[in-house]
Image (tube, rainbow, N blue to C red):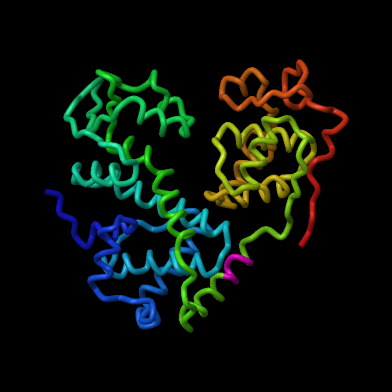
Amino acid sequence: MLQLGTEDYAKYPFLEEAREWLRRLGITLEEIDEYTEALSSAKERLIKAYKHGHIDDELGDSDKELLSFHIALLLVKLLGVEQLALKFSLAEARRVEHFLEREGKKDLVAYIFKVVSKVEAEEVWQTVGGVEYDYRIPVIDYLKRAVHLHSPEWKLVNRVVDGGFVYLTTRDLSRLIREEIRLMIYNRIKSLPQPKLTPALEEAIEDLRKVIKAVTPTTQIIVEPTKYPPCVQHALDLLQRGQNIPHFGRFLMTTYLLNIGKSVDEVVSLFAKAPDFNERLTRYQVEHIAGLRGGGTKYRPPSCRTIQAHTLCFKIESCDNIKNPIQFGRSRAKGGLRKRSK
């Protein structure tokens, strides 16, 4: 029978067993102000998630780590900043993914996969082509999750399939459920009752507000629909809702906007709403596409045929017979995005 310990609770704090452990410790909201180290750690988790898109996966005191996660949930709820909720839930999901990839207990990985996905991951010991596979899951359950992953390695034709099952490494299994872990954490934030504000929580919230204000771009881009080819508009709509878009979608949107005259700063500010936004990395990538770094080549938007191959074409009547999105509504190409300074 699988036995979980306090270190497991610290690594996988979203588990019901982890919450039960906190209850057994007798920690209540009224006492939070007394746990200054855990509160400070919670604040640091949120700052790193918002600024850098990741949270350190080094473990300290297990009980403090576990408590800091749950205090962070309260802080996000109290702040009510949607972008923080999105960034924090994604950063925590990535942290869990890293722990799962290095997890020495195969049965624990399978258990967490089942808790999160409601799918049984059967443990196997199978070597194919020099690769050791640790689990297998039904093809239909694999496809439901792999559809959100756009690298060629996740296409079914590139996987080992036998008897209606897809064979997976621990890394594969961990990556497959990242999005479901993110949603689990995000939904938990949304379902929390509004916490009572304590002096220590209020102080932490004020500190976090200052950080959020300092790193939020001062220039906003207002996206007006119908001005852009539907493939680009789709990417813009996802960003406006604070959702991630696949790598190719980012490349498509960036090349298009740069080629119709938008500045690097304007494009970077659009990505600020993405849950995994990292300004330094995003700026570097946009500058590279703009020809300001590397070999100095300014990239053009991919062709419509290439966009179709990546299943990102959403053709409408106005597309007519264009071969490249840059040809869409030439007379409208200078509209659509307006810059507004705060």
Residue that lies at the very extreme toward the top in this rendered image: 321
Residue 320, given in percent of the width and then of the height, sits at 78, 18
Residue at 30% in and 21% down: 160
Residue in the picture at 78% in, 35% down: 226
Residue 137 vs residue 272: left or right? left
Which residue sits furthest right? 331
Instruction: Residue 17 in the image: state x and y as whole percent.
Output: 25, 59
Quadrant of the rendered image containing residue 255 = top right
Task: Count numbered badges in the picture.
Answer: 0
Image-quadrant location for residue 165: top left
Q: Toward the viewer: 31 or 11? A: 31
| 109 is higher (above) or lower (below) than 295 | below
Q: Residue at x 15, y 50 (%)?
A: 2
Residue 297 visible in the snapshot = no
Q: Could you say where residue 29 lies in the image, as x and y percent from the top left?
A: 38, 76
| In-image side of 290 versus 124 (left or right) | right
Q: Is residue 110 visible in this depiction of the protein? A: yes
The picture places residue 243, in percent across and down from the top left corner, at 57, 45
Task: Decide whether the magenta segment is chiefly helix, strand or loop.
Answer: helix
Please check the rendered image and state whether residue 243 is part of the magenta-colored stretch, yes or no.
no
Magenta region, residue range: 209-213
Q: Would you place residue 215 above or below residue 148 in this image? A: below
Q: Is residue 211 magenta?
A: yes
Quadrant assignment, res 107: top left
Q: Residue at x 62, y 52 (%)?
A: 272
Q: Is 141 drawn above or below residue 264 in the view shown? A: above
Residue lying farthest to the left in this orientation = 1
Left or right side of 219 for 56 = left
Quadrant of the snapshot with the C terminus = bottom right
